C-alpha cells in the first residue's frame, strides 16, 4: 500500500510538471503568434430580429498553431491576460476587425451600416493608453468610430470602477459603442447600471438557454430586457439555439440576437453574402 501511495504521488507530481511545461510552451508560442500570423478571426453575425437583417458581427479570435489543432479563445485568452500578452493580442484583434469592417463596407457599398463587436479584457482597459490605441487603430484602418462596439463583462466594472468608467466615457466620447457582455451572470446591482457609459447589454446565453422551460430564467431575462430598455440600452440576446428561444427573446423585447440557430461563427468571406444591400438603394 505504501508503494502504491508513492506511485500515486510521483504520478501527480509528473502531471503537474507536464502541465507547467505545457503552459510555459504555450506562453512562449503565444509570444510569437501575432508576429507569425497564427491568429485569425471568425465572425458571428448579429441579427436584428424585427427585420431579419444582419447589422453587425462579433469578432472571435482563434489560434492556428502549425501542425496542431486550432485553439479557441478560452484556451489562451486567460493565459494572455495573466502574462500581459493580451496587449499585443488585443491590439491585433482590434486592428484586424476594423480592417475587416471597412473591407465589408467597400465590398457592399449599398449595404446598411455595419458594426463590428470586439471583446476586450479588463487588462486592456487598464493599460493606461487604451483610448489612444483605439483612436489610432480606427484612424489607420479608416474606420468610423460608430463601426466599432467594444464588449466588456460585468466583472470589469467591479475591479477599478472609477478608472474603468473614465475609460469607457472617453471611448464613448470618440463615438465607439460599449456593450456589457454576459449580462445577468455577475453580481452588479441594478442601480450600478444607471450611470454607466454604455449602449447595449448582451444577455448571457446561460439565461437564454433557460428562457423556454425555466420560469426563473425567463423572469431574469424579462427583467433585464425591461431594465435595458428603460435605460435606453439595446438589449441583445446571445446563444440563441432554438426557434422557441428566438421567439421568446423577441417577445420579451430583445431587438438583436446572435446564436447557432441564426449563424455560427465563420471566416469573414462567409459573412459577405449575408450583408444585404440597403433596401433604399
Ligand atoms: P463571448 O464573448 O460570450 O462569445 C460568445 C461565445 O459563445 C463564442 O465562443 C461563440 O462561438 C459561442 N456561441 C455563439 N453562439 C452560440 C450558441 O448558440 N450556443 C453556444 N453554446 N455557444 C455559442 P468562443 O469563440 O469560444 O469565445 C469564448 C469567449 O472568449 C468569448 O465569449 C469571449 O469572452 C472570449 N473571446 C473571444 N475572442 C476574444 C478576443 O478577441 N479578446 C478577448 N479578450 N476575449 C475574446
Ligand atoms: Ca462577447
Ligand atoms: Ca457573451
Ligand atoms: Ca462568455
Image (cartoon, grey):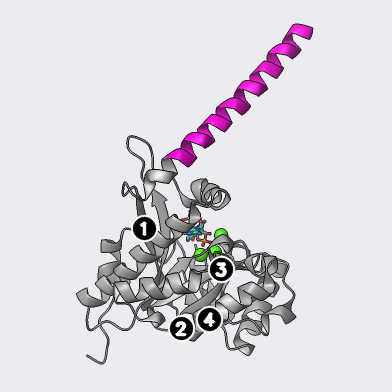
In percent of width and height, residue 51 lies at: 39, 83
Q: Residue at x 42, y 62 (%)?
A: 91
Label of residue 41 in the image: 1
Q: Which residue is mark 4?
A: 170
Q: What whole-number distance in Å separates the C-alpha atoms at marks 3 and 4? A: 15 Å
Q: Residue 97 sits in which quadrant?
A: bottom left
> Which residues are drawn in magenta?
1-28
Quarter of the figure with the N terminus: top right
Task: Give the mark toward the camera: 1 or 4.
Answer: 4
Instruction: Kindly state the secondary structure of the residue where label 3 is placed.
Output: strand
Q: Is residue 26 left or right of residue 263?
A: right
Q: What whole-number distance in Å separates the C-alpha atoms at marks 1 and 2? A: 25 Å
Residue 21 falls inside the magenta stretch? yes
State yes or no: discs 4 and 2 in contact (Cβ < 8 Å): yes
Q: Earlier in the sequence, mark 1 or mark 3?
A: 1
Q: Residues within 10 Å of mark 2 (few under 14, many from 20)?
A: some
Judging depth in this view, the residue of 175 and 75 nearest the camera is 175
Label of residue 174 in the image: 2
Q: Residue at x 38, y 44 (%)?
A: 32
Q: Quarter of the picture for ligand 4?
A: bottom right
Q: Is mark 2 within 8 Å of ligand 1?
A: no
Say how many tags the image has.
4
Amino acid at each position: 500500500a505504501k508503494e502504491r501511495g508513492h506511485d500515486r504521488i510521483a504520478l501527480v507530481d509528473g502531471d503537474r510538471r507536464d502541465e507547467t511545461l505545457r503552459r510555459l510552451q504555450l506562453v512562449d508560442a503565444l509570444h510569437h503568434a501575432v508576429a507569425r500570423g497564427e491568429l485569425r478571426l471568425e465572425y458571428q453575425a448579429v441579427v436584428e430580429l424585427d427585420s431579419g437583417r444582419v447589422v453587425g458581427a462579433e469578432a472571435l479570435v482563434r489560434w492556428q498553431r502549425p501542425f496542431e489543432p486550432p485553439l479557441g479563445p478560452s484556451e489562451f485568452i486567460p493565459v494572455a491576460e495573466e502574462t500581459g500578452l493580451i496587449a499585443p493580442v488585443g491590439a491585433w484583434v482590434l486592428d484586424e476587425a476594423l480592417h475587416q469592417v471597412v473591407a465589408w463596407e467597400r465590398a457592399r457599398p449599398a449595404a446598411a451600416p455595419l458594426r463590428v463587436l470586439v471583446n476586450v479584457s479588463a487588462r486592456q482597459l487598464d493599460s493606461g493608453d487604451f483610448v489612444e490605441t483605439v483612436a489610432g487603430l480606427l484612424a489607420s484602418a479608416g474606420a468610423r468610430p460608430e463601426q466599432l462596439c467594444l464588449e466588456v463583462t460585468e466583472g470589469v466594472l467591479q475591479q477599478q470602477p472609477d478608472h474603468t468608467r473614465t475609460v469607457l466615457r472617453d471611448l464613448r466620447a470618440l463615438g465607439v459603442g460599449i456593450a456589457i457582455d454576459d449580462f445577468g451572470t455577475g453580481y452588479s446591482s441594478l442601480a450600478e447600471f444607471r450611470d454607466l457609459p454604455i449602449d447595449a447589454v448582451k444577455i448571457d446565453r446561460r439565461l437564454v438557454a433557460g428562457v423556454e422551460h425555466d420560469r426563473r430564467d425567463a423572469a431574469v431575462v424579462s427583467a433585464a430586457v425591461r431594465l435595458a430598455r428603460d435605460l435606453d440600452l439595446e438589449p441583445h440576446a446571445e446563444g440563441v439555439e432554438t426557434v422557441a428561444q428566438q421567439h421568446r427573446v423577441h417577445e420579451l423585447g430583445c431587438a438583436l440576437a446572435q446564436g447557432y440557430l441564426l449563424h455560427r461563427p465563420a471566416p469573414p468571406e462567409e459573412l459577405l453574402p449575408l450583408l444585404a444591400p440597403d433596401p433604399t438603394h
